[in-house]
Image (cartoon, grey):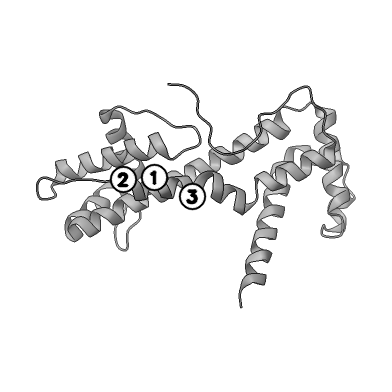
Amino acid sequence: MGLRIRGNLPLKNFESVQTAEETLAEIADLLSEEQILAEVDQPMDQAAQAFRLELKEPLSHSSFNRAVGEFVRYVYQTGPRLPRDLSESEAMTEGIYLLTRYYRGGYTEGYEGALLDAMAGNLEGLELVLSRICESVKEIERAKYVNWVFAEHFDRLDWGARQRLVSAYLDQYRHLLPAKLLELNPARLVDHFRVLIINHVSSNSLLKGLLQVK
């Protein structure tokens, strides 16, 4: 299977030279909620909505497992930025793992809880379980996306470039940062850059949300 990457993200030219300020702006843009929604959430939601399941028998333990496997196989093929082509057994195993690890119903949890919710609500219950699987996959794919952003734009840089990036961050946002943080040597903050940027972008997203509330 060939590598397929969704979206209009430019491939990095490793010979191009960006200033620390330009790299900082690019990281902030890639980590914005709008960008993550476009790159991760929306394609996953579209894949889940496009999935069609035909049950030829009343919902049972075995047909529940098959439905979970078919759903996981489909969304992994069509939803993520880096698709995965799973076999039927691999998809079923992955789906059971996701439910065991992440499923939380109104009064249930785990795989057994998901099975109970699906059996109790029949097709509507099954749809709820599949939507919870989709939400779990989105959270996993969001984490992968964030890891990619930092691997591509920060982790691969040499020490000096990473330090200059921290300095650019401190200079650009000094009006928002506590004085004690600004007093620190940028070299001491290199290992904390990821947390600083994620918190900064999250705060901006929260502020935008509050300003949009009427």
What residue lies at 32% left-to-right and 58% top-to-bottom?
105
Residue 76: give x, y in percent of width and height: 39, 36
Q: Nearer the viewer, residue 146 or 96?
A: 146
Q: Are marks 2 and 3 in contact (CB under 8 Å)?
A: no
**Whole-percent x and y of residue 50?**
34, 47
Q: CA distance from mark 1 to mark 2?
A: 6 Å
Q: Amino acid at mark 1?
A: Ala
Q: Residue at x 30, y 52 (%)?
A: 129
Q: Is residue 66 visible?
A: yes
Identity of the residue drawn at 70% across and 31% down = 155
- Between 67 and 161, the one lying in front of the other is 67
Q: Amino acid at mark 2?
A: Phe
Q: Which mark is residue 51?
A: 2
For the residues marked 3 and 1, what is the alpha-carbon distance in whole angstroms?
9 Å
Q: Residue 29: which numbered mark, if any?
A: none
Q: Check disc 1: other Cα within 10 Å, few if <14, some if 14-19, many if 20+.
A: some
Q: On the image, numbered disc 1 is attached to which residue?
A: 47
In the rendered view, does 132 fall on the left or right side of 26? left
Q: Which residue is mark 3?
A: 42
| Res 133 visible | no
The CA distance from mark 2 to mark 3 is 14 Å
- Mark 2, residues whose alpha carbon is within 10 Å: few (<14), some, or many (≥20)? few
Helix, strand or loop for disc 2: loop
Image point (9%, 47%), residue name: 57
Q: Are marks 1 and 2 in contact (CB under 8 Å)?
A: yes
Quadrant assignment for the N terminus: top left
Horizontally, residue 80 falls left or right of residue 127, namely right
Q: Quadrant of the C terminus?
A: bottom right
Counting residues from the start of the chain, the first of labels 2 and 3 encountered is 3
Within 10 Å of the Cα at label 3, are there few (<14), some (14-19), or many (20+) other Cα atoms? some
What is the residue that sits farthest to the front in this orientation? 8
